[in-house]
Amino acid sequence: MSTYIELLISGLVLGSIYALMSVGLTLIYGITKVLNYAQGSLFTLTAYLAFVFFSNFVSMNYFVVFFITLALMAVIGFVFEKIFIRPVRRLPGWDFTVIIVTLGTALLIDNLFLVIFGPLQKTLPRAFEGSLVLGAFRITKHNLFIIVAALLTIVILDRFLSKTRVGMSMRAVAQSSEGARIVGLDVDKVFGYSFATAGVLAGIAGILLTPRTLIYPLVGWPVFQKGLVVMVFGGLGSIKGTLYAAFILGMVEIIISYVFGARWALPVFIIILIVVLVFRPKGLAGRWQ
Amino acid sequence: MLNTKNLYTSYGELSVVKDVNINVEKGELISLFGPNGHGKTTLLKTICGLIKPKSGEVNFNGSRLDRMDICEIVERGIVYVPEDRNLFTEMTVMENLIMGTNPIRARDSMKENLDYVFQLFPKLERIKDQLAGTLSGGEARMLTVGRGIMSNPEFMAIDEPSLGLAPNLRVEVFNSIKEIQKRGVSVFMVEQSTSMAAEIADRVYLMEEGQIVYEGEPSEVFSDSKLKQVFFGL
């Protein structure tokens, strides 16, 4: 029984990471119609930034590093949109061009990691060391922190989107770009805010997961690939659908890994992606546009 | 208050608005008539900054609107009320109205304008928590006008307010537009062939093939059978 509970917890941990990654992707897609292939590289960038902080300021509190890194990711996300996306959006046929631009940027960033940090893996400290034993099962404190932090992030994001003027502006642009211009919203700025928010989400995922996986230049790619499957499975542009899909696929991955081995997880994800595209291209939430 | 000088707008090589000169005084209600596809909406969108003109000027209280971006134009008190609604369909009626207060100039008078919108369209208050995407045509039209009022405008450009509405709702919408004018807001309204839009107007324009071909007072139109035929097909 305890094995199943531990599998369930592992599924929740993975689901939490996929939720953060894919909600960022779907937020950007829903608002800007950009499929951001560089989201995985932003995930990796956060891990390296945190690594630099922890290496140079050993005495710095974990949570101080956590929030400084996230603040930097918000700025980086905003600047990333301004430098790489905004000029492309003004070109004819931009929706295809922007895919190449984000993919190219991802490759550039990943190779910079290789040049700066080398191919050897780095480590990040965990938020909390040790485990909690609750009756018949145990959970590491860091895993518990991942689940709590992810859920808290999702609640804060929901409040941010529904209650703040910036969040409402993001939803407004997603629903009617023309309507947003009519009420005088600066659509360019709103696009920047979306990338800043997605940068923070990728950042939280990066800081939370890399203490488990170690840091290397391409560590963001598997998470990005799975985040992409989650996003399509959930329904492009739908945050609620994406959240459901993240936790469902997190559980699926754990079960597949337990029964057949971890190397089967990605192939199964790709099969799920193909099946979804064939039988329900609108995804769980049915919002394909 | 607002005028255009030799205004031209085109889509690529196709000229849609040609050498248009109009003027709207403070607190005036103007109706612009014309057949479908003759450039009325394009003129409205050009005035409000949604489309950049090819040449000519749009002046508002001494400033050149045609040189500003739309955020700045809205901030100056110009609002476009679109014919095709352009509402935020997955937001509530209330959230749509709040989005109307995006200009900084509208923030201080938000409560006052909200009360006014609910006084003008009491139904909107009853359905304030309903998603805009679930509204009927008439309700959506009221919300579009209400969202425009929330921006605390000095000049409202309203595109075909009666389009697709039942006759009783048309009366309600036109009465509300007259009320908005009484508040000191200048209204420039586009219509195809609704005589009521002329009845409530101070002046009327007729636009054909992108050009203004007639300017006058509604009484002149109603007293001339030829003009009545041209304006309303009567």
Image: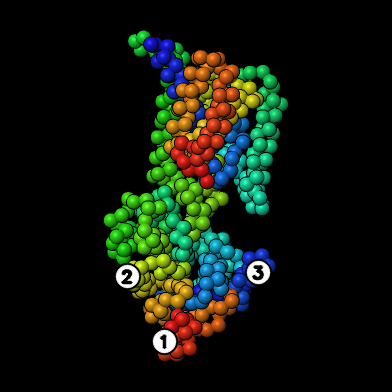
Alpha carbon separation for disc pair 3 and 1:
34 Å
Kind of residue at badge 1: Phe
Direction from residue A36 to residue A157 in the image, left or right: left
- Crowding at dot 3, Cα within 10 Å, few <14 / some 14-19 / many 20+, comes out as few
**Would you name the residue on which mark 1 appears?**
B222
Q: Is residue A287 above or below residue A177?
A: above
**Would you name the residue on which mark 3 appears?**
B14
Marks 1 and 2 belong to one chain: yes
Q: Is residue A169 above or below residue A264?
A: below
**Mark 1 vs 2, N-terminal side:** 2
Kind of residue at badge 3: Leu
Residue A180: horizontal and vertical position, in percent? 49, 55
- Crowding at dot 1, Cα within 10 Å, few <14 / some 14-19 / many 20+, comes out as some
Alpha carbon separation for disc pair 2 and 3:
38 Å
**Would you name the residue on which mark 2 appears?**
B168
**Mark 3 vs 1, N-terminal side:** 3
In terms of depth relative to the viewer, which is nearer, A27 or B233? B233
In terms of depth relative to the viewer, which is nearer, A199 or A61? A199
Residue drawn at 48 percent across, 18 percent down: A255
Kind of residue at badge 2: Asn
Residue drawn at 59 percent across, 38 percent down: A36
Residue B154: horizontal and vertical position, in percent? 43, 69
Q: Mark 3 — on which chain does it sit?
A: B
The image quarter containing residue A155 is top left
